[in-house]
Amino acid sequence: MSQPAVKYTGPPRVFSGMQPTGDLHLGNYLGALKKFVDLQHSHECVYCIVDLHAVTVWQDPKILAAQTRNIAAAYLAAGVDPDKAIIYPQSAVRGHTELAWFFNCVARIGWLSRMTQFKEKSGKNSENMSVGLYDYPVLQAADILLFKATHVPVGEDQKQHLELSRDIAQKFNNDFEVPGFFPLPEPLIKGPGARIMSLRDGTKKMSKSDPSVNSRINLTDNADAIAKKIRKAKTDAGVIPESLKELDDRPELANLVGIYGAFAEISKQQVLDKYAGKGFGVFKPALAELAVEILHPITERMNDYLKNPDETDRVLAKGAQAANQIAEPILAEIRDVMGFWKLKP
């Protein structure tokens, strides 16, 4: 689509969220939570627990609220400050679902049919999947644009969905002749730790659904478990090479080097410079020590939050109120633009 004649001039704002399903792990921390913490110091940030996305597949109603609270605890334990960033449950802001319906009438079936994640998740079972699972990229666009977010920290696997959000924003702006009304949100992908792979298979992304507990480090793992999983991580018979090119055919090593770099906040090349020629008997213990140093305090704080759900609920309630205060005026603008009837004062 063509670029808008008038660019969005509103305030820069970051939006992102995580689903309240399963245990958060190292990949979630380095790929998302660490970036959430860094961004709150330079941007206005809105961080959601996307429980509406979670229910596109069956969720046990008895534990959904607790799972939502667990994700909030992870945000807080990782260092997201509720005085600097908004933390709230998606379902507590009804504008998400209202705007999703408006966008359903803007988006096109052909756009959704090209979404590769639905095809991957449904496989040959697509006709038995929920409409919500098919349509959730539209809800994702509503999540972002409800706050007129300008930037979204995403992984490579979500880049296509962000492109859909941009397409919907642009079509809305064009259809209703309001150039620059919605921003075209930009991805924030760069930086170490953007994609963390399984500790058992360096070609697969670290996942909470992997049946092997040794494939991931959970944020609730204690220091001994963290160190043990790194020591048992799959590697090869070589030594640490000098150049990045030599990592191309060594995915497990490339993953561990990336993890070290993300923890130490240095490049992969700097990691290689430090350990070139050394074996895994040196590198793995050093990585384990660094991982425990970074993750163990987060684990302790997270367990403290899990023991005190009232404190987490207080943060979520405050965040929901703040999120609504941003979203409602924007939603009122959208209703006006679309021409809906409203009660006169």
Image: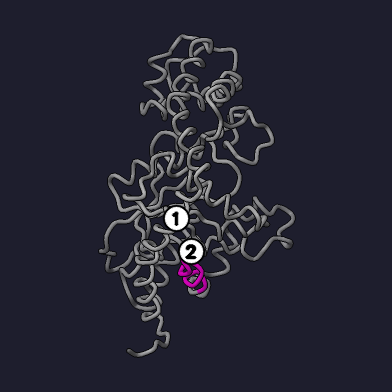
Mark 1 crowd level (few <14, some 14–19, many ≥20, 10 Å Cα): many
* Span shown in magenta: 92-101
Q: Nearer the viewer, residue 149 or 310?
A: 310
SS category of the residue bearing label 2? helix
Q: As drawn, which residue projects farthest toward the bottom?
A: 344
- Quadrant (top left/top right/bottom left/bottom right) for the N terminus: bottom left
- Residue 206 lies, in percent from the top left, at 57, 36
Number of dots carrying numbers: 2
Asked if the magenta segment contains residue 95, the reply would be: yes
Numbered disc 1: secondary structure: helix
303 up-or-down from 338: above or below: above
Q: Position of residue 301 (x, y in %)?
A: 45, 36
Which residue lies under the disc numbered 1? 316
Mark 1: which amino acid? Answer: Leu
Between 315 and 93, the one nearer to me in the picture? 315
**Position of residue 306 in the picture relative to residue 125 (left or right):** left
Task: Find residue 163 and report its image quarter.
Answer: bottom left
Ranked by sequence position, the earlier of labels 1 and 2 is: 2
Which quarter shows the C terminus?
Answer: bottom left
Q: Amino acid at mark 2?
A: Ala
> Distance between the Cα atoms at labels 1 and 2?
9 Å
Q: Residue at x 68, y 54 (%)?
A: 122
**Labels 1 and 2 touching (C-beta < 8 A):** yes
Going by the image, does 298 lie left or right of 186? Answer: right
Q: Give the dominant element type of the magenta stretch: helix, strand or loop.
A: helix
Q: Residue at x 64, y 50 (%)?
A: 120
The disc at residue 234 is none
Q: How is the image coloured?
A: one colour
Residue hosting label 2: 92
